[in-house]
């Protein structure tokens, strides 16, 4: 019997019952889940119980959850599902942001011993949407600097960029509205207006980043499980890539979903070396996961 009162056998019996009984979930949740995703999810939550992963620090848990998804394929636009905006759960394939969100949600669910599909989905919605509630396309945290700000307000992460010597990035954020043709949902006038209003609201916020020339000097202060947001020189855009920091034998590496045609992987070299290999990557923001409030 585990310390929290549920044995591995009890959990697996309950988990097995959940798979064929998707009808027990609300219709909105059924529509977002494939059986494969439920299987992966319950397997990993079960592993969290079996290995007592919930006793680990939250950052270490995020790193462990990220490793669960190594060698999964990269897939863009997995959140652009048909119909009205809804919570999408996809643990079979990832882009760079969904990898971070899924790993963080998994870590928080394990930490809270929320060993159910519903418990995981609650964490994912909290992380992905402004204020923790899915309320249309514009409620999704499309710009990652706002993702960090909003999740700091919700006490999901702490933005430690300033403590790492971050400097101000005063560039305007308007990539979505100035590239409307790249976002099919923005063909609808109401959605476009909501995104423009959101971009205007971001103009008054202070945004910090650590320039890539300085990253090597602060890598030792980055912890395993920190969420790394890689800033960019692309006009109108704040962050172009994200991943999870791993501290291995004194080196900070990046666990990430790199690009189309590639698999979730860990960089062979350091985070700073990765940045210097990409001309348009200008630096990093760092968000440190916080223990869930129970």
Image (cartoon, helix red, strand yellow):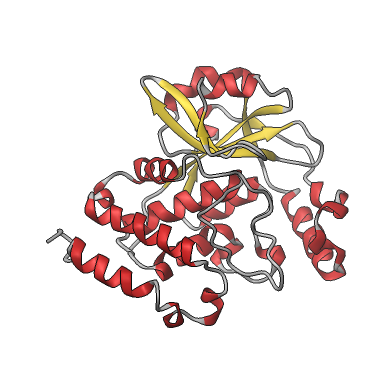
Q: Residue at x 55, y 34 (%)?
A: 162
Position of residue 197 measured from the top left corner of the image (x, y, whole percent)? 79, 60
Q: Is residue 160 left or right of residue 67?
A: right
Q: Residue at x 85, y 68 (%)?
A: 188
For the N terminus, the quadrant is bottom left
Q: Is residue 208 left or right of residue 14?
A: right
- Where 135 falls versus 2 (above or below)? below
Which is nearer the eye, 42 or 288?
42
Q: Residue at x 54, y 65 (%)?
A: 132
- Where 37 falls versus 60 (above or below)? below
Position of residue 255 measured from the top left corner of the image (x, y, whole percent)? 50, 35
Residue 174 in view, yes or no: no
- Where 178 falls versus 117 (above or below)? above
Give the farthest residue toward the left.
1
Please state the total of marks drawn on the protein image. 0
For the C terminus, the quadrant is bottom left
Residue 132 in view, yes or no: yes
Which is nearer the eye, 106 or 265?
265
Position of residue 43 measured from the top left corner of the image (x, y, whole percent)? 35, 57
Which is nearer the eye, 286 or 275?
275
Q: Is residue 111 left or right of residue 129?
A: left
Q: Residue at x 77, y 45 (%)?
A: 173
Position of residue 211 measured from the top left corner of the image (x, y, whole percent)? 64, 24
């Amino acid at each position: 019997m585990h310390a929290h009162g549920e044995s591995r056998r009890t959990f697996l019996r309950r988990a097995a019952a959940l798979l064929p009984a998707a009808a027990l979930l609300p219709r909105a949740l059924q529509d977002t889940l494939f059986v494969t995703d439920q299987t992966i999810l319950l397997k990993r939550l079960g592993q969290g119980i079996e290995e007592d992963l919930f006793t680990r620090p939250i950052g270490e848990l995020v790193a462990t959850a990220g490793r669960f998804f190594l060698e999964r394929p990269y897939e863009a636009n997995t959140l652009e599902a048909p119909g009205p905006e809804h919570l999408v759960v996809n643990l079979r394939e990832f882009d760079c942001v969904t990898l971070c969100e899924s790993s963080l949600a998994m870590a928080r669910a394990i930490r809270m011993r929320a060993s159910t599909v519903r418990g995981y989905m609650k964490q994912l919605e909290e992380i992905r949407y402004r204020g923790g509630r899915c309320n249309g396309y514009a409620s999704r945290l499309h710009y990652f600097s706002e993702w960090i700000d909003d999740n700091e307000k919700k006490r999901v992460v702490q933005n430690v960029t300033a403590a790492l010597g971050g400097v101000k990035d005063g560039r305007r954020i308007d990539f979505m509205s100035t590239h409307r043709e790249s976002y099919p949902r923005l063909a609808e006038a109401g959605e476009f207006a909501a995104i423009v209003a959101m971009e205007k609201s971001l103009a008054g916020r202070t945004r910090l980043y650590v320039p890539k020339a300085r990253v090597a000097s602060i890598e030792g202060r980055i912890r395993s499980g920190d969420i790394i947001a890689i800033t960019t020189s692309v006009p109108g855009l704040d962050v172009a890539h994200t991943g999870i920091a791993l501290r291995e034998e004194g080196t900070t590496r990046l666990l990430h979903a790199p690009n189309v045609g590639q698999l979730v992987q860990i960089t062979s070299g350091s985070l700073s070396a990765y940045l210097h290999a990409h001309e348009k990557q200008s630096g990093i923001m760092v968000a440190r996961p916080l223990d869930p409030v129970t």
